[in-house]
Amino acid sequence: MRIVIDTNIAFSAILNTDSRIARILLHPRSKFNFYATEQLIKEIEEHREKIQKLGAYDNYEINRLIKLITDRIRFINVKLIPEVSYRTAEKLTHDIDIDDTEFIALTEHIRGKFWSGDKSLQKGLLKKGWNKFITTDELFERQLRKGRR
């Protein structure tokens, strides 16, 4: 399953490596393929000090955790996303959260699911008929089912 990760999911995993989110991302035999645009790395860097402070991490720890999480994600250059997917995403996000355009465009392009904890984004996109979300609970349950086989 192809899953596009919103930045808030990566933040959560970095801040709590024992959380369900981190366990899903870091599962060694995961059948999920995680994707994001390079914007995710940019946003992590923009908020690095805040994440470091919230997690009470030293420089070594924050670097290690960012690498641990981002190594599980395939980063796609936004220039590789077809214009039609990008334009569709712009129409969907322009009045909700323009910062999520790349993630929605990538989700459209790879025909994946979008994993985000942003409730206002979800609500706004649902109003427009876009429902390609997957929740942490759904991913966790799928991972458990696969582990039982």
Image (tube, grey):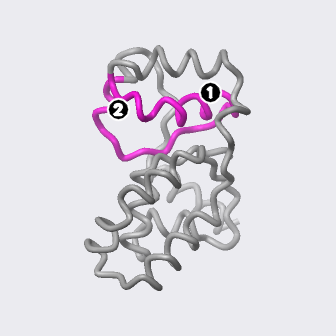
Amino acid at the residue labelled 1? Glu
Q: Element under label 2?
A: helix
Q: Which residues are magenta?
A: 96-124
Q: Residue at x 69, y 29 (%)?
A: 81
Left/right placement of residue 49 relative to residue 132 reads left
- Above or below: residue 12 compared with residue 5: below
Q: Are marks 2 and 1 in contact (CB under 8 Å)?
A: no
Q: Residue at x 64, y 63 (%)?
A: 72
Residue 113 drawn at (x, y percent): 57, 38
Q: Residue at x 49, y 29 (%)?
A: 101
User: Is 88 inside the magenta-drawn segment?
Assistant: no
Residue 94 drawn at (x, y percent): 39, 19
Looking at the rendered structure, which numbered label has been put on residue 108? 1
Per the picture, the main secondary structure of the magenta-coloured stretch is helix
- Above or below: residue 127 compared with residue 115: above
Q: Earlier in the sequence, mark 2 or mark 1?
A: 1
Residue 65 drawn at (x, y percent): 49, 75
- Above or below: residue 21 compared with residue 107: below
Q: Quadrant of the C terminus?
A: bottom right
Looking at the rendered structure, which numbered label has been put on residue 93? none
| Residue beneath disc 2 | 121
Label 2 to label 1: alpha-carbon separation: 16 Å
Q: Give the quadrant of residue 100.
A: top left
- The front one of 9 and 18 is 9
Q: Residue at x 60, y 60 (%)?
A: 145
- The front one of 68 and 138 is 68
Left/right placement of residue 55 relative to residue 46 reads left
Amino acid at the residue labelled 2? Leu
Q: Element under label 1?
A: helix
